Image (tube, rainbow, N blue to C red):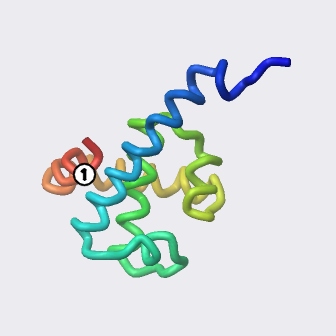
Amino acid sequence: MVDYLNDNPKAKKRTNSEELVEKVVKRVLVNYGITKDELLSKKQNREFVISRQIIMVAMREKFGYTFREIGEYFNRDHSTVIYSINNIKGMAQVNKKFNQELEELIK
C-alpha cells in the first residue's frame, strides 16, 4: 500500500506552507485590525472581506492551494474564491498603493 501523504511532494510542501500561510494571516489581521474569528465569519464589512480576499490570493498564488482547499479554509464555495482572487487582482492593477500593500502583506 502506498502512503500518498508521505510520498507526495506536494503534500509535504503543503504541510510546510501551512505555517507560512498562518504568518500571512497574522500580518493581514494586524494590518486591518481584525481578529481571526472576524476573518472567518460571514460578516461582510469591508475590512473583513478585503482581508479574506488578500489571504485567498496568497494561498493560491504563493502556496498553490486549490480553489476548493481555500474555500474549505474560509467555509466558502470555490466560486467565491475565484471571484475574490479576481477582485483583488483587479484592484491591484488599478491602484498602485493597494498593489504595494498587497505585495507587502503576502511576501
**Amino acid on which the number 1 mark rests in the picture:** Leu
Q: Please tell me which residue is depicted at 63% across the width and 53% down the height of the picture.
A: 78
Of the pair 44 and 93, the residue shown nearer to us: 44
Q: Is residue 38 left or right of residue 99?
A: right
Q: Mark 1 points at which residue?
A: 105
Look at the picture and state if 34 lies above or below 103.
below
Of the pair 56 and 16, the residue shown nearer to us: 16
Look at the picture and state if 64 lies above or below 75.
above
Image coords of residue 79 (percent x, y): 62, 54
Residue at the farthest right position: 1
Q: How many marks?
A: 1
Image coords of residue 53 (percent x, y): 42, 59
Quick one: label 1, few (<14), some, or many (20+) residues within 10 Å?
some
Q: In this view, does 81 lie to the left or right of 30?
A: right
Question: Dot 1: what SS?
Answer: helix
Q: In which quarter of the image is residue 8?
A: top right
Q: In which quarter of the image is residue 1?
A: top right
Look at the picture and state if 106 lies above or below 12.
below
Q: Please tell me which residue is depicted at 37% across the width and 75% down the height of the picture.
A: 35
State the quadrant of the C terminus: top left
Q: In this view, does 81 lie to the left or right of 16?
A: right
Q: Please tell me which residue is depicted at 19% across the width and 48% down the height of the picture.
A: 104
Q: Is residue 88 left or right of residue 18?
A: left
Q: Please tell me which residue is depicted at 49% across the width and 34% down the height of the picture.
A: 64
